Image (spheres, rainbow, N blue to C red):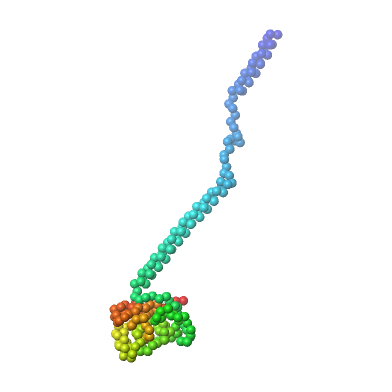
Amino acid sequence: MANKKKTSTQKNSSGSGKSAGKSNEAAPKPTSAEAKPVAKPTASSAADKPRAARSSRRQKQQRTNIAIGAGIAAVIIAAIAVQVIRESGKPGQRFASQGNLHIASLQTPHVPYNSNPPTSGPHMPGIAGWGVYDAVQPDEFLVHNMEDGGVILWYQLGTPEENDANIDLLSAVSRNYSRIIIAPRENLPSKYVLTAWTRMQQFDDIDREGMLRFIEAYEGLDHHPRY
């Protein structure tokens, strides 16, 4: 009886040993399903990226537009400055153009001329003949002569003797030019006045150098509109 009991005890010990052996096994590793989850981008963060890119492109385009606008403005200002300098260097006073309108007859009403003598504005379809006159000529013809590149040398209307003397003086100045008219006028602002399209210069006496400078600057310039 004692031997059986011992055997039973040994079996139990052996069983206990197996349990102890199992308890020393390594702990199981987590499966892939049990791994630490990786944070995924949210819908809002994904939308922020293209929005930021669009904003960056928009700002870049705005800077480009500003640079282009500044460049264009600089070119325009420079062109205006050059034109002002160029105009300021030309002889005579400048008057605003009143256009190139043709009128049907000398009796056709039209806007008043903005200078005396006129320097632009409504005029007859034809021109006065180039040359010398001892009688007052219609403004509406002489304006067309100026549009065609003519220079008018006006002298104060006086006696026939005075007119002849002025004609001789002005002819001596302008004899080398073809598009010239010498004509008298009443109520001139000065004794002599030279006009071209939108230009006028007054002279109290014969100034050959000054008159030639004016003629050289404007004689032969065509002022018909370009369509």
Q: Position of residue 160 (x, y in %)?
A: 33, 91
> Which residue lies at the image location 35% right of the left edge and 78% below the top edge?
201
Tell me what residue is drawn at x 35 percent, y 87 percent. Answer: 157
Q: Is residue 8 above or below residue 119?
A: above
Q: Is residue 73 above or below residue 209?
A: above
Q: Hey, which residue is sitting farthest bottom in the picture?
A: 160
Q: Residue at x 42, y 66 (%)?
A: 76
Whether residue 30 is situated above or below residue 5 in the rendered picture: below
Q: In the image as oriented, which residue stretches furthest toward the right?
A: 1
Picture coordinates of residue 183 (x, y %)?
A: 36, 86
Give the mark count: 0
The quarter of the picture where the N terminus appears is: top right
On screen, 191 above or below 79?
below
* Left or right of 27 in this view: 167: left
Quadrant of res 71? bottom left
Residue 224 seen: no
Residue 20 left/right relative to 96: right
Left or right of 4, for residue 200? left
Is residue 34 visible from the viewing direction of this image? yes
**Which percent across, then down, holds residue 174?**
31, 83
Quadrant in which residue 93 is drawn: bottom left
- Look at 43% across and 61% down and name the residue there: 70
> In this view of the protein, which residue sits in the foreground, 28 or 115?
115
Where does residue 115 sit, x and y in percent of width and height?
A: 41, 79
